[in-house]
Every structure is written in structure tokens, then in C-alpha cells.
Amino acid sequence: MKKNWRPYCDILLYLMVIKKIILLFIILYIISGCKFTQSTPPASTLSPVPTFTPVPPTPLPVHFYQTGNVIQFSRDGNGRNFFVSGWSEPEEGFTRTCDKKAELVFQINQEEITCDVIMKVNLEPDIAKGKVERQRVYIYANSRKVGEWIVSSPGEYKIIIPEVSLMDPLLRITFELPDAFSSNSHSMKNKLPVSGIRVKNMLLMEIYRPGEQINFIKDGNGNFYKNHGWSNGEDNFTWTDGKKAEVNIPAGDIKGKLIMKVFTGGLYNPGKLEAQRVNIYVNSNKIGQWIVRDKMEYTITLPEGSIINNNINIIFDLPDATVPGKIGLNSNDDRTLGLCVEYIILEAVQK
């Protein structure tokens, strides 16, 4: 039987066609230089990849503040260093708020602050008779409300800022003034959007803790506590100057009685003036008397409840204070001297 070669011929023909196609493809590849990889457009044609750029915080006029230093809000004072918002241009003696909120920012050394701080602000309200008789002032420290004042007359207003609000190196003080009113209805030289309070000065200082010594030597911390009736500090003490000398001691929540110890001596000259009578008043109430001559530590007990509005007010009444020349002493000193005080200490009474 004759063998059928046709299937084999078909296969051979098919292979020859495949070979031609492959050769053609190789020739085209060589001629065109084409590469069998995904083409990448030039970098210049690529769309930029979006990136996130954080918006920088609004810069603040941050200045360092040392506790105990007075900030003056007068035209020539340093108050504007701490302004953030809500303040007008400083005027002669004060700066007005000009919004429902007024903010200050301080840079502090929180490592030096080891307890609560008391803030004292000397201010007066803007009032309109028959319309606004007082200003409510809500005080915030780093967004935490620490208290409020009802300001109906000029004076020194105090508030305690808890230590927890002082853990950040930046301290933001906010005065919220819900009663601030439009100055258009109020007689004022420079019209403001709203008028609230006029701030003269302020300071921050640590509250007094029982057992701490208040030093009245030169450059001592007694300057933070002295009110009227004191001379300038000397190397070892400070003289009272006048018939009365006053001390204000900011204090926190101290319970019970306190013992006040004062190391002092009196102005005297045997045969002319034997000693100094010292009447002691706490918050306008007389609590006792000393007869002071030689330098030593004198003590007296302050009654319970001596802290009023976070403050202990002590007055030394000195009826025998005099100019030294009048009792035969240094005639070049024209001060009215009574006591030379080295230190004051308040101690809690142990129950």
C-alpha cells in the first residue's frame, strides 16, 4: 500500500511559515530597536507627587518673664512684650483692653517654679453710668479657668494660678470680659471696638509657704513683700521709714494659726529713747505689741483666718519712730526710723 506523505508535508509547510514569521519579527526588532519593556515617560512629563507640608504655627511675641518682676503697662513700659491679642496701644499709665478677650503670653522657667503662683494685677474698670457699673473678668491660665473678679473700682486684684498650669514653658493668660461694651456710647478720646478694663501693672510670684524666710537684706526677697513704710535694703537689714510699715504676704490655703518670727532691733538711745513700741495688726485687727530694743527674734501668733483673698496683711505701727537727730544720733539721716528688720518667718502651729 502506498504511504500517504501529505500530513507530513503540511506540517513541514507550517513550520516553514512559523520560521519566516519569527525571522521577520527578529528583523523588525533589530531595525526598530524596540525593547519589550514598559516604556517610562521622561521625568519632565510626570505629574509631581503631592506632599504634605505642615502649616507653621502663628508666631507669638514670646518674651521671657522672671517671677517677681513687675510688668508695666504704661506707654514706656514693657507690657507690650507680652501682648497677643485684645490690647490697644499703651497710654500714659495704663493699657486698655479692646475686645471681649485679652491675652498675654510669657515664657517661664518652669523648673524654678515649685508651687502655686499668685498673680497681682493693678487695674480699673471702664464703666458707663446707668449701663455698665462693673466689669466681670474671668481668668484663664493655659485654657484652664482659675477664677474671676468683679471689678467695680480701681485696685489690686489677685488670683492664684495652680502649679499644674505652669508645667509648660509657655504661660498664656486670658482675661475674658463679658461686660466689655462699645466705646461709641462712652466718652473716650480714642474710640475702641469695645472697652473693658485698664491695666496699670502686674506681677507673678510664688505663694508663701510656711517656714520660708523673707529676707530684708540688700537684694533679698523682702522687696516682693514690702508695701509702704520701708527704706531701701542695706547689707544686713532694712529700716522702716515712717510711723507705719506694711507687709503683704501672698499665701495659699494655709489652715490654722501661724507663728510670726521677726528678727529685728529698734532705734533707741539710752536717756533719750529707751525702746520702740510696736503694735502689730493683721488685716486691720490688732493682735499684740512688742517692746523692741536689742536685735533678737520676736514672735507673735497670728490668729486662724489671717489669710483673706489669698493674702496676709501685716502692719507694724510705730508710735516711737523718729528722726535719729532728734534723739542725739546721726543728724545726717532724715528718715523716720523705727525697726531694722533682717527677716520674717511664718510657721504653722503644730496641733
Image (cartoon, rainbow, N blue to C red):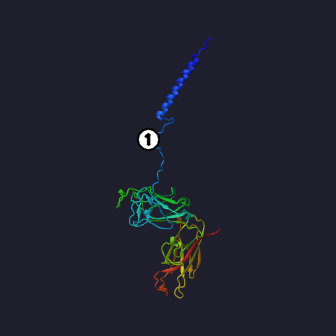
Residue behind mark 1:
45
Q: Position of residue 222 (x, y in %)?
A: 53, 72
The C terminus, quarter of image: bottom right
**In this view, 26 is above or below 75:** above
Q: Quadrant of residue 90?
A: bottom left
**In this view, 263 is above or below 37:** below
Residues 84 and 310: in front is 84
Mark 1 neighbour class, 10 Å CA radius: few under 14, some 14 to 19, many 20 or more: few
The answer to whether residue 153 shows anywhere in this view is no
Kind of element beneath mark 1? helix
Q: Position of residue 147 (x, y in %)?
A: 51, 59
Residue reaching furthest to the top: 1
Q: Quadrant of residue 132?
A: bottom left
Left or right position of 240 against 300: left
Q: Residue at x 53, y 26 (%)?
A: 19
Q: Residue at x 52, y 23 (%)?
A: 17
The N terminus, quarter of image: top right
